[in-house]
Amino acid sequence: MEIKATINGDEIVKNINPNKRLVDFLRDDMNLKSVKEGCSEGECGACTVLLDKKAVTSCTLFAGQIDGCEITTVEGLEKTGELELIMKSFSKNGAIQCGFCTPGMIMSAKALFYKNSNPSKDEIIKAIEGNLCRCTGYNKIVKSIEEVRDGIEHE
Amino acid sequence: MNKSIFTAPKSLDELKTALSKKTHNTYIVAGGTDLAVGMNKNKIYDFSLIDITKIKELKKIEYKDDLIEIGSCVRMVDLEDNEIINKYVPSLSKAASCIGSTQIRNLATIGGNIANAAQCADTVAVLFAFDAEVEIINSIGEIRKELVYDVIQGIGQTTLKDDEVIIKVIVKGQEANEYSSFSKIGARKTVTISKINACIKLALNDNKITDSRVYIGSIGVKAVRSLLIENALNNKVFNEELKEKILELGSKQVLDSIPKRKSKDYKKIAVKGILDDIFCDIEKRRNLDE
Ligand SMILES: Cc1cc2nc3c(=O)[nH]c(=O)nc-3n(C[C@H](O)[C@H](O)[C@H](O)COP(=O)(O)OP(=O)(O)OC[C@H]3O[C@@H](n4cnc5c(N)ncnc54)[C@H](O)[C@@H]3O)c2cc1C
Ligand code: FES
Ligand code: FES
């Protein structure tokens, strides 16, 4: 099936297997390896991407469903230069240990910022409730997102 | 091997055509949160899909002649934020807001929650309490209506035929003297298929309860209506003393419904927590109205 979609700002027209899960399409066909597959059940959030600016788990929908939609992954934030500030904040605060959850966390935070440029701590916590991290204990991640919100820059 | 086909109709007319070509291994997909996970888990790769989420009509919430019509592809996030739902079916907003995580609520639809017919589907307990109906279309364009309660037959079982799709959920909103709330308890803080949930709807005249509907989910193949609790509520004064009595009856209802299940020991206690929560929420809403 041919789909038309905007992926990380680029319009693509591509013949794809629509019955693949979105996570498989993004990783295998689009080579967007920031998208991680953890639980495969919608529980861990490692595969989170933005679908029309909203956070979704890419293991819980089919690739064909994105026809006509806009998808953003961490690679997209890298392209626009937004990733740098976020990564510095995460690194500086010790919010990245094994790093497996990080892309999903970043995309959930980005979705929140689209909706609300000045979220409270509680709103940040709620936005990442579907993202599991087995290393950091979350506080450092929340703090990093608060600093991104406040535009605090780290060297 | 069958050829995999993916169709995304844009109108009910196109849906009708797609349904008329549906084979036994063609699935309807809305949010995908149950289906995509299930197919992957069961290692099923050879199938066709009809994606109904591109049909604009199915994404609307409308207030029509005292009735609220919710398109089957309305997502949990929409139910959570919608003014009409917040005002007339607040327990449905609450149930939607308790589902999964942000990522899941951005995809999961009300139609999918009904059609999937999980024992503890959260919006379903509310739809039962409101006597909600669904409108169903088939491959020749015929439309039929059925109570959500009757559509769901058992765990994963519905009256939906192979060529049928739920297009709308129709709910009569609560009146100014009516209150409703929902609560649940699950294994993990937020991301969970609730282990037990409940919805209560009350009509009050001053402080007296004139009518009630009580459904408890996850203590039967589908949410169970508790006449035991309803009888204890009707014609009583809504107060703390009544609440205490209802919590005890909640435990009794659990034991009556699942006398042999191991989970009864946990659920007979958990049910008190959720009923307490519901009472407090209704109390809070009443105070706001005064
Ligand atoms: C991580 C996670 C957490 C979850 N947490 C909860 C929770 O807390 N509470 C809860 O209740 N559920 C929960 N769920 C289950 C699921 O998200 C809901 O049941 C959801 O509402 C399903 O909707 P969907 O649109 O994603 O359905 P889909 O997966 O698209 O479809 C589900 C089933 O219904 C059929 N179907 C869908 N729409 C229609 C229609 N209009 N007419 C006929 N058939 C149709 C499909 O063919 C399929 O069999 C969770 C799921 C996940 C993955
Ligand atoms: S891999 Fe998708 S949520 Fe875990
Ligand atoms: S850093 Fe390891 S899972 Fe979060």
Image (tube, coloured by chain):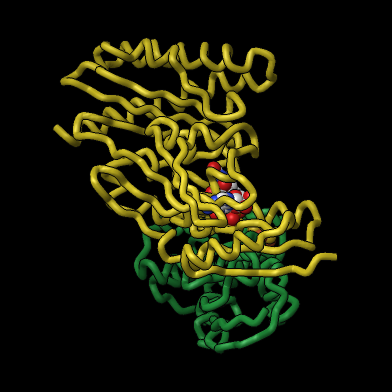
Q: Residue furthest left?
A: B290
Q: Is residue A97 left or right of residue B223?
A: right
For the point 27% across and 35% down, the residue is: B174
Q: Position of residue B13 (x, y in %)?
A: 48, 65
Q: Is residue A72 above or below residue A142?
A: below
Write down the quadrant of residue B175 in the picture.
top left
Q: Residue B267's spot in the image, x, y percent?
A: 58, 22
Can residue A139 be spotted in the picture?
A: no
Which residue is at the front of the view, B20 or A121? B20
Ligand number 2: quarter of image: bottom right
Residue at (66% x, 85% y) in the render? A14
- The image shows a total of numbered marks equal to 0
Q: Is residue B234 visible?
A: yes
**Where A109 falls versus A3 (above or below)?**
above
Give coordinates of residue B192: x percent, y percent.
59, 43
* Image quadrant in which the C terminus of chain B is located: top left
Chain B drawn colour: yellow
User: Residue B101, relative to residue B117: is it above or below?
Assistant: below
Residue A115 is situated, as x and y percent measured from the top left of the image, at 38, 67
Q: Judge left or right: residue B173 versus residue A72.
A: left
Which chain can be seen in green?
A
Q: Nearer the viewer, residue B106 or B38?
A: B38
